[in-house]
């Protein structure tokens, strides 16, 4: 890979290194949702959730649409769940005695 490609891949992984962003993605896996509902689901504040949604949107993981004053987000790149499945599967094997935490 070229240095530019390595940097793009590293940036993508960096975006996914924040636990709250993973929680947001996991919640949005069930379908489109308003920022208010995402905020409640991940037990955070609206400004914090909005900041993380913007980062996820900039990286292409989620897309947004606005309806009046309400902003809705949905998954834009379904491949993220394939990556999560690979990582979770690997962790289940490595920590088989703790595999229940990966549900």
Image (cartoon, grey):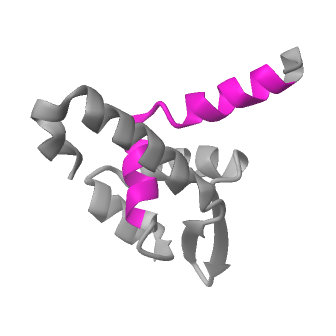
- Total of numbered circles in the picture? 0
Residue at point 84% right, 21% down?
1
**Could you say which quadrant of the image residue 5 lies in?**
top right
Q: Is 70 situated above or below 59?
A: below
Residue nearest the viewer, comparing 88 with 14 = 88
Residue at point 43% right, 38% down?
87
On whether residue 59 falls in the magenta region, the answer is no
Q: Is 25 situated above or below 100?
A: below
Give residue 32's position: percent from left, percent from top.
51, 76
**Could you say which quadrant of the image residue 14 lies in?**
top right
* Magenta residues, start to end: 5-27
Give residue 66's position: percent from left, percent from top.
65, 77
Give residue 35's position: percent from left, percent from top.
46, 66
Majority secondary structure of magenta residues? helix
Residue nearest the viewer, comparing 34 with 1 = 1
Residue at point 20% right, 53% down?
103
């Amino acid at each position: 890979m070229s240095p530019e490609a390595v940097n793009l891949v590293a940036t993508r992984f960096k975006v996914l290194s924040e636990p709250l962003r993973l929680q947001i993605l996991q919640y949005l896996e069930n379908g489109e949702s308003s920022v208010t509902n995402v905020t409640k689901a991940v037990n955070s504040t609206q400004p914090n959730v909005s900041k993380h949604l913007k980062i996820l949107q900039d990286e292409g993981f989620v897309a947004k649409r606005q309806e009046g004053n309400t902003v809705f987000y949905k998954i834009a790149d379904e491949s993220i769940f394939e990556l999560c499945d690979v990582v979770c599967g690997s962790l289940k094997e490595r920590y088989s005695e703790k595999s229940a935490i990966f549900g």
